[in-house]
Amino acid sequence: MRGAPRVAAAPRLYDRTRELAAVAALSARAAEGAGGVLLLTGGPGTGRTALLDRAVRDAPIRAVRVAAPGGNRVPWSGVRALLAALAPSPSAARRALRAAKGPGGVPGALAALCPGEPLLLCLDDHHLWDAHSRTALDAAWRARTGPWAWVVSFAAYHRAPDVPGARLLSLGRLSRAGARGLLDDVCRAPLTESFRTRLLDEAAGRPGVLVAAAARLSAEPRHGAGADRSSGPVIDDASLAEVYRGLLDSLPAECGRVLTLVAVAGEPPPGTGRSGTVRPVDADAVLAVARAVRASPEALDRLVADGLLRGSREALRFDDPLLRRAVLGTLPPSRRRELAALFAAPHADRPAGGSGPAGTVRVPEGGPGLPDLVRGRAELARGRAGLGDGPVGDAHQALLLAAGLLREEAPEEAAEARFLAMEAAWAAGDPEACAVALGGADGPDAGADAGERDFRDGMRAALAVRLEEARAPLARVVARDGASEEPRRLLRAGAAALVLGDAPAAVRVHARALATIRATGGSALLPRVLEHLAYAELRAGRHERAAAHAREGLRAAESAGQRNAAAHQHAVLALAASVRGDAPAVVEHADRALGTARAHGLVQATTLAEWAIARAELAGGLAAQAAARLAPLVGAGPRGGHFALRMLVVPCFVEAACAAGREAEAGPAAEEFAVWARLGLDPQAPAQLARCRALLAGGGDPADWYREAVRQHEESGNDFERARTLLAYGKWLRRRRRLVEARGPLSDALVTFERAAAGVWADQARAELRATGGAVGRRAVPGAVDELTPQQLRIAGLVAAGATNHEIAGRLSLSPRTVDHHLRNVFARLGVRSRVELSGLLSRTTGDGRRADR
C-alpha cells in the first residue's frame, strides 16, 4: 500500500481477526524453532501495510517490517534493506549482504546476523522489490531453514509468489460497522450523519480510503458538520491518487498511459450537465488516440488480461471504479483537458458520417463513429495483439479488415496488415486464408513497393505449388529485404527464404533482424523475431542454437504476454529436446505448447509439438505409439498436420511405421514425399527419401539405398539426420548377420550422437554396436564432466553456483520436477551424492575457464 497516508497514532484494526490470528500462529511456530510463510494480498487501500505494522508491534519475538526500497530497480536493494534492518551496524549489514550473494543465500546471511534467534520478517509490497531480491527470497523460503516466520504482502492484480506450503489470505473490505468505527477513530472533523453515510458508501469498506479522506477532511474543516454537499463525490480524486499510488507506480509506463486514456475517455463532455457520470468507453476510440499519442496499443490487452479493465469491446470499464478516479487525480488539469480534446478532435482529413465540420469526427457515446484511417489502425492494433495472444483466426479477420480500411490512405500500414494476416493464417495452417491475405490476382495495390509485389507474387505461386514461378520473386525478396535495416522487411525476407528451402539464409536474415531489434530497443517485435529465428535454426539442423534462442524468446514472449509466441517456442524446445532424447523435457514443453496451441488454433505449433513427442517415443523404442501419433500429421485436409510441415514429418513417420509393421501406410506417404523432394525445397529431402526407400525395401537393394542416403547427407550437412540414417543402416546390417559391416555405420552414428548430446539415440547406437561385438568405447565414469549433455552441464553449473531447483527451472524454462530428474542423472553419471560434492567436482574440472552454467 505504498503511498497511503499515515496518521500520528496508528488506528485500531477492524475486521482483521483472522489475519492477526494467522500471524500470531506463525510467530509462535518461529518461537518454537520452526517457521513458515504467510502471504497477504489485497487491493489498494485494503490495509496491507497497517496489518504488517500491527504484526510487528504485537510480535512476541523480534520483528521488523521492510517496505519496497525506493530504488527498487537496483539489484539486491530489497535484500540490502532487510539486512540493514536486522544488522547492528552498516558494516555488519555489508558482510551479511556478501553472504546473501554467496552459496548460503539469504538463510546464510540471517544465520550469521541472528544465529538461532527466531524472527518475524514482514516484507511489504513484494511485487515492487527488485528481481534479484525476489529470487533470493524465493530461495530462502524454499530452503525452510532457521526459526523465521515470513509475512509477505503483495498487491492484487499481481501474481502471488510461488511458495510451496505457504498460506494465502486475501484482505477483504471492512464491514459497515468496522468502517464506521475506523472513521470515528481517525477523523477529527465533525461530520453530519448524511455526509458520514455518503463517505462510508463511497469508500466501500476500504480502510486506506477512509484514512486518506479523514486526513483531508481534518485539514479542511469546511467539509465538516455544515458542509454536506448535495451532489458530486465527497472523497476527492487527489486523495484516491495517494491511496492508489503504489499500484499506479508499479504499472509499466505504456500501461499507465493507456489506462489514463480509458479514464479520460469515460468522462462526459463538458457542458453536458452530466458531471460525475461515467459513459461507455469504446476500445476503437482508445486505440486510435493511443496511436496518436504514441502509446502502445498492446498495453490495452495487458490491462484487460490483468483484470484492471473489464467489459466488452464497445463498453470498457474499470474493474475498480475508484481506480479510474485515482488515475484522473494524478493528471494536471491542463493535461486532462488536452487528452479529453483528443477524443473529440480531428482524426482525418475528411468528415465521417456527416457529423460536425469537415475534417472533424466526434466519438458518440454509443459507438466510435471513426473514419477508415482510424478504424483501420485500431483493427491493425487489435489484430497484432491477437496474433500474439488469442485465436489466430480472429486476428486474421481483424488484420484483413485493417488492410482494406488502410489501403487508400496508409498503404504501408495496409501492407503490414496483409503480411500479419498471412502470418496468422500460416500459424493456423490455412493455405487458402494465406492466399486471401496476400491479395487478389488483379495486381498490386497502389503504393506497394517492389518487395511487397515480389513477396505477394512469389508466395501466391508457392501456395499453388508453382515453384518455378515462385523462385525468382522470392529470391529477390531475400536479396533486397535481407539487406534492410527494417525488422519487418527482414521478417518478410526470412519467410521467403524458408519457403524457398534456404534455411541458412533464413537464419542469417532473422539473426540480422534480431541484432537490429536489440540495437533499437524494439521490444514489441522481439518475441516474434526470436520465434522466427529459432524455427529457422531448427530447420537448418542447429538444434542447440535453436533451443538457446527459443529460451530467450520464451522469456520475452511471457514478459510481453504473447502466449502464442510462447507456445511456438515451447514447441521448438520440445523438438530440440527430442534430438537430445530428453523425454521429460519433451513432454513438458510439448504439453505447454499444446495447452495454448489447441485453444488458439495454432496448427503449426501443434504439429511441431506432436512431432517432438513422436520423435521421443521413437527414440525410446515406442515405434507403434510414434506411428499412431504421426499418421494424422502426414495426412492432407483439415484433420491433418500443418500444410508446410506435412512432408517434413514423413521420414519420421516412415521409420516409425516400418518399425511398427505398418508398411502399407508408409508406402503412399513415401511416394508423396518423393514428389515433394524433387521440388528442391529441402536440402535434406533426397537423403531422407533414400532412407525411406531403404526402410521400405522397394525398388532395389536396401544397402544401395542406405549408401545413397549417406552420400546425400554428406552434401546437405545435417549431422543428426545423417546419424539416424547410419543407425538405421547399421541395424539393418546387424539383423542380417553382417556384423563386421555394421560396426562402421554404428560407430560413426554413436560418435555423432554423442557429439550432439543426443543421449537416448547414442544409447541405441551403443547397444547395437555392442550386439555386433564391436568396441563401444568408454561409458561415462564418475567425474566425467565431458559426458554430460549441454542441458545437464548448465543445470550442474547453476547448482554449483548455489541456485535452487526452482530458480534453475525459471531460468531454463523447465519445471522443478524436470530439473530434479536431470540432477539425479548428473549425480549418477558423475558419481557424486550431494550438491556440495558436485560443486567441488566442477570447480576442479572447469578450472580451464569454461563456464559450466552457460
Image (cartoon, grey):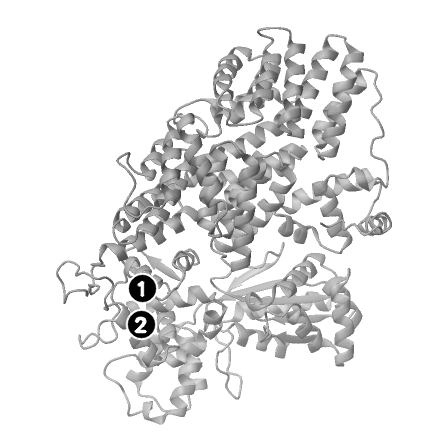
Q: Nearer the viewer, residue 304 or 217?
A: 304
Q: Residue at x 51, y 50 (%)?
A: 527
Q: Residue at x 58, y 7 (%)?
A: 698
Q: Nearer the viewer, residue 369 or 17?
A: 369
Say few, some or many: other residues with alpha carbon within 10 Å of mark 2 (under 14 / 14 to 19 / 20 or more): some
Q: Kindly identify which numbered label has been placed on residue 659.
A: none
In this picture, residue 56 sits left or right of residue 314 = right
Q: Position of residue 205 (x, y in %)?
A: 40, 73
- For badge 2, the amino acid type reads Leu
In this picture, residue 506 sits left or right of residue 318 = right
Residue 542 visible to an observer of this rendering? yes
Callout 1–callout 2 Cβ contact below 8 Å = yes
Q: Nearer the viewer, residue 494 or 581?
A: 494
For mark 2, give the secondary structure: helix
Q: Position of residue 199 (x, y in %)?
A: 34, 80
- Locate residue 358: give its quadrant: bottom left
Label 1, label 2: how far apart the Cα atoms are? 9 Å
Q: In the rendered view, tell whether residue 491 sits above or below residue 475.
A: below
Q: In the rendered view, tell whether residue 504 sits above or below residue 301.
A: above
Q: Residue at x 59, y 69 (%)?
A: 73
Q: Kindly identify which numbered label has been placed on residue 289.
A: 1
Q: Nearer the viewer, residue 584 or 710?
A: 710
- For badge 1, the amino acid type reads Val
Read off the residue under disc 2. 339
The residue most toward the top is: 700
**Earlier residue among tags 1 and 2:** 1
For mark 1, give the secondary structure: helix
Q: Position of residue 269 (x, y in %)?
A: 22, 72
Say few, some or many: other residues with alpha carbon within 10 Å of mark 1 (under 14 / 14 to 19 / 20 or more): many
